[in-house]
Image (cartoon, coloured by chain):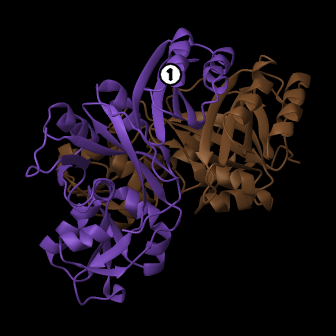
Chain colours: A brown, B purple
Amino acid sequence: MHDDKTPITVAFQGEHGAYSEAAGLSHFGKAVRTIPCETFDAVFAAVETSASDYGLVPIENSLAGSIHRNYDLLLRHQLSIIGETYLRVQHCLIGFPGTSKEQIREVISHPQALAQCEGYLKSLGASSRAVYDTAGAVRILLEQGDPAVAAIASRQAAKVYNMEILEEEIEDDPSNTTRFLVIARTTVDPSDEAKTSIVFTLHNIPGALFRAMSVFALRDIDLTKIESRPVAGKPWEYLFYIDFAGSTSQQTVKRALENLAEYAEMLRVLGSYPRAKEYNNHQKS
Amino acid sequence: MHDDKTPITVAFQGEHGAYSEAAGLSHFGKAVRTIPCETFDAVFAAVETSASDYGLVPIENSLAGSIHRNYDLLLRHQLSIIGETYLRVQHCLIGFPGTSKEQIREVISHPQALAQCEGYLKSLGASSRAVYDTAGAVRILLEQGDPAVAAIASRQAAKVYNMEILEEEIEDDPSNTTRFLVIARTTVDPSDEAKTSIVFTLHNIPGALFRAMSVFALRDIDLTKIESRPVAGKPWEYLFYIDFAGSTSQQTVKRALENLAEYAEMLRVLGSYPRAKEYNNHQKS
């Protein structure tokens, strides 16, 4: 689909310099063209309509848990997960070149980033203002031109706008890590160590869940994630998210999924993909 | 411990009018005395040091997933869960009496609340500013006295400060529901329909997890929540959160937990408590 001159494209939520973009560049390498999108929905739509080859969305954070919104969008769209990547979220205080953090009277960023640096901001004694994007905060900073204002964003965002990092790793919890998924219109057949993500529903628990899990346990298939989530408005009905080791091209996995389909009310294979380095094997940008 | 004249006390994170306080009042009734705390840690400390009889903390949200921080605090403190309660998060735009939403040029609130009303704020065309608390935003509003500024907070917060609700249910996703836990120094023996919450670790999966689940399945104990979480810095080690129907005073539950202790590396019973109305059976305040 791509000759050597056309770079592959990766859609992400946010502006240039966003953490999702950093995760995309770390996963695909610097040669890709990244496409900023305003919402997660827009990322899925960009991939679905071929406006982008791939999409990159956060799926779980070590502090905040699973991002149910993106599981919902995975169910709503006919796209596949073809990869995963982990990013340690390292927030920077970014200001105009030549300024120091003592000068800062106001800090702007995305609400989540402000919340994750709450302790730091208190000690800084600066007020905070919410904007719709971390990288966008750096752009606003540049546009407004006030040296007493700083932004919280990624190291990449400072580079994009030629601004200065006044302080690094200002997040209150240094274990803050986000797992991202790569989505595409086609599936892949991972030859290396693979992982598969599925979503299914069961009517009742535990008989049904125990049987559902037995299809993996009895075939020695390792689970790497299991999570239940109540289905909105349907008491006693649950969605289950399961990730397990192996690919749908393997015979044992095929049989396990056929077996699961007998118990599950709904079963959707979201994709098989190469397994990324373990959670908390952090990469420096 | 309490005579009729001394009301029981309930610590919560935030200022008077916070959603946690609303959940506490809905759970205990209006006669309790609520104690605002700056952080979740402070809520646990208040209960531990007997500064408060009970604490009330959010544990999972229908959009954002489990609040791992409070699971961590449950493990760190020797307190018990003695109750649960669900609250539908209904955000209000709150301004000075006599103002209308067309006049509003800036909206202040907690970063999470601003994020949950992102769509609404865009349509309103107002800028937003982050402060450390939803109810605190209403207090700041009152102190600053600018009628072009509004806050996003609960209906209760408007009441506390005698301010006006300019618009209700402004959250982008109306299914936004938070489950809260009631924590105490002592345990309870729920006579009604009970639920028990446990946390445990297992070295490997799925053999171990399957065996762990079999202790419930083989005794017909219903699971209402299961979630795995990677242990920070320990690849292949997982924390499991499980909620199940029944109380530790029941013989089958006792045996199941004894059985689980044989497989689990660490096992902590967080408490047995009366089961609240199902997720998404929303209450109006």
Closest to the observer: A12 or B259? B259
In the rendered image, residue A123, in percent from the top left (x then y), is placed at 18, 43
Q: Is residue A6 left or right of residue B2?
A: right
Give the farthest residue toward the left: B5
Q: Position of residue A49 (x, y in %)?
A: 80, 62
Q: Is residue A164 left or right of residue B230?
A: left
Side of B134 where B7 appears, left or right: left
Question: Where is the C terminus of chain B found, in terms of image quarters?
Answer: bottom left
Pick the residue in front: B185 or A139: B185
Q: In the figure, residue A278 lies in which quadrant?
A: top right
Q: Is residue A28 visible?
A: no
Mark 1: few/some/many CA within 10 Å (<14, 14-19, 20+): few
Residue lying at 53% horizontally and 17% vertically, measured from the top left: B255
Residue at image point 27% right, 88% down: B99
**Residue B25 on image: x %, y %:** 28, 58
Which of B29 and B174 lies nearest the eye of the viewer? B29
Q: Report helix, strand or loop for mark 1.
A: helix
Please count the marks in the image.
1
Left or right: where does residue B33 sit relative to residue A156?
A: left
In the image, residue B270 sits, relative to residue A127, either above or below, namely: above
Q: Position of residue B129 (x, y in %)?
A: 31, 65
Residue at screen point 33% across, 45% down: B57
Residue A238 seen in this snapshot: yes
Residue flagged by tag 1: what amino acid is it?
Answer: Gln
Give the residue number, with chain letter if any, for mark 1. Answer: B251
* Quarter of the image where the N terminus of chain B is located: top left
When asked about the image quadrant of residue A220, the answer is top right
Residue located 69% across and 15% down the image? B207
Between B245 and B127, the one lying in front of the other is: B245
Q: Circle 1 marks a residue in which chain? A: B
The answer to which quarter of the image holds residue A174 is top left
